[in-house]
Every structure is written in C-alpha cells, then in structure tokens.
Image (cartoon, helix red, strand yellow):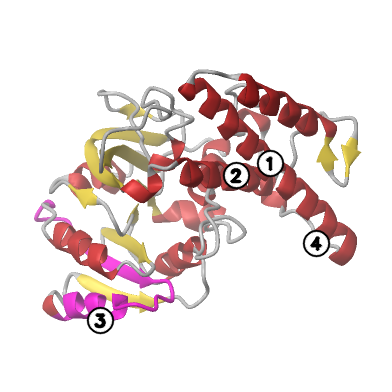
Amino acid sequence: MDVTVILCTYNRCRSLAVVLENLVRQVMPDSATWEILVVDNNSTDGTRNVAEEFATKYPERIRYVCEARQGLSFARNAGISQSSARVLAFTDDDVTIEADWLRNLTAELIQGNWAGAGGRIVPLWSRPLPGWLCADDPNTMGPFVAFDAGAEAGELVRTPYGANMAFRREMFEKYGGFRTDLGRSSKNLQGREDIEFASRILARGERLRYEPSAVVYHPAPSERMTQSFVLRWWFWYGFGEVVDLGPPPGARWHVHGIPMSLLRRLARWSVEWMSSSRSQQRFACKRKVWYLAGMISACYRQDTSRNSAGVEIPEISRRPPEHSTWQTDGSR
C-alpha cells in the first residue's frame, strides 16, 4: 500500500459523511494504491454506522477501526499501527477537501524525497469577523487552524498542522508516535501533538515539504467565533506548551513550580488589557492573559504531580532549543 489516509473522528457523524464523500473522490495516479482508515475515538453518536456504511459501499477503499482510549493522539497512533502503507496522511473529520489534495500532498513522499509534508489550510468563515478579531494577526487566528506559507512549494521551516499533513511511515518507526499526554480529548482543547511530532523529526535533521496545492478548507462555525472559545483555546495552548516543552527556561525564582517571570508577565498583560481602549488591542492583551494562565496552571500541576506522586515530565519534551516553539508575540 502506498498511502493510507488516517481520519480520526469523534461524535461528528454528519460531517464525517461529507468528508468521506470528498475522500473517496480523490484523484490519485493509477499506479498508486491507497485507502482511507476511519478511526472512531469511542464516539457515542452515529459515527460507527456512517463509517461502516461507507466501508460496505467502498470495501476496497475504506476500513473502520475503533480506539476506545479517549484522545486524538491515541486515535492517530491506533491508525498508524493499523496501516502498513509507506505514506500516512492525516486530516480532520469536518473539513472540505479538493479532489487533488491527496495526490498533491503525497506525490513527493511516495518518491521518497521528503520525510513529511504539509499543505494549506483555509478557514471557512460562517459569518463576518467581529471587530475584536483580526485576520492579519496569526496569534489571534490560532484557534481557526489557518496555515499558509505562501504560494511557492519548497522546504518547510515551521511545523504543519494535523488537518493537512503526511509523513513517511519510517518516521514513526524511527522516532515513535504522537505523544499521548498531548492532543485534544473530549474534555479539553489541548493540542500540540502534531507540532511536537514534526518538531521532533526536524530536530533529528529530517526535511519537511510545503505543498501549497494541497488545500483543505476548515470550518470556522459561529460558536467558535466568540471570545470565550478563543480564550479557552489559548488557555489550553499555553497549558499544552508547558506539557510539551516544560516550564520556560532561565527563571531564577519559582512559586509552587511557577516561574516568577510568568506571574510578572501575567500582571503586566492584565494591566494592558484593562487599560486598552481599542477592541483588537484589548482582546490581544486579554488573549495573552489566558495563554499565560494556561502555562501557569500546567507548571503548578506538574509541580504538584511530582511532589505527590513522583510523576516525571517525559524525556522527549527536552527538545533542542533551536526547534522549540515558545511564543514570541510579546507574551513572555
């Protein structure tokens, strides 16, 4: 098998049906063998029925497996273990996919020229952007899964996102799978498992390709275009960043595992938030407060865990500094 598309899903049976209709219509070279593997992450809606109906209709194209351990990383790792393809592609269960997406994303990987690849992710706005949300601010836009590194194909110097990425199987065989202490579950918005994996292989000298012609469209529904959702997302992003990389380095003083520098920055941005008059600037400061609050929460939890149960931070989080992904938008 040349390519397996690993499609992890949780309680989105309606959008899953749309994605599967898109995927079975992918235009691949006649010489390429490929399949779609639906990984049901313990859904409680009609997901299994939808997936099995498609598998019955397209038995040579679609397979279904269930992963009962909750969490996106568990689901992705289950998909990896259930496939023998040379290239593994990943996308989300709520996207719209162009017919040449899979061919464009994986062509160079099938030839063995790159370790992995990422393509463009374009948000599909359900309504006009509110005044506090700026499409030109990549940090504020983080929750909407936008990824665009330009119009030219070439080497990626940043990590791709899970909605549009692919890797050669040997990358997982050499460097392991997705970290299960990262990744979204039904209870939180913590992510970074895709960023961490790509950063891990980049740190080993592997090369990733950017393919702008591999396009997926990611929905931005009204319920996500709210301050409460964006703030929640940034809280969990900060939390996941500490789980991934550990607390920010270089701090001299700590309180319950929390670097004093984080507390000072939290105070600074709280004052900026309360004193800003322009809506976009005010929300940008507020977003940084929630991001720092997530980092502080993770630092405190790690310290409490170590003191009470001897839990250690996974060694893989100690990534070389040149491939760390600490935020540099002024929140530190």
Q: Which mark is residue 235?
A: 2
Image location (x, y in percent) of residue 289: 64, 34
Residue stretch rendered in magenta on the structure: 28-56
Of residues 81 and 52, the one drawn nearer to the viewer in this rendering = 52
Image location (x, y in percent) of residue 322: 62, 28
Per the image, label 3 sits on a secondary structure element best described as helix
Examine the structure image and report whether residue 29 is included in the region drawn in magenta.
yes
Of residues 166 and 292, the one drawn nearer to the viewer in this rendering = 292
The quarter of the picture where the N terminus appears is bottom left
Q: Which mark is residue 311?
A: 4
In the rendered view, does 8 fall on the left or right side of 318? left
Which mark is first along the chain, 3 or 4?
A: 3
Q: Are marks 2 and 1 in contact (CB under 8 Å)?
A: yes
Specify the quadrant of the image occupied by residue 22. Answer: bottom left
Mark 1: amino acid: Ala
Which mark is first along the chain, 2 or 4?
A: 2
Of residues 109 and 68, the one drawn nearer to the viewer in this rendering = 68
Question: Which residue is painted at 76% across and 46% down in the image?
Answer: 299
Mark 3 — residue? 49
Which mark is first along the chain, 1 or 4?
A: 1
Mark 1 — residue? 293
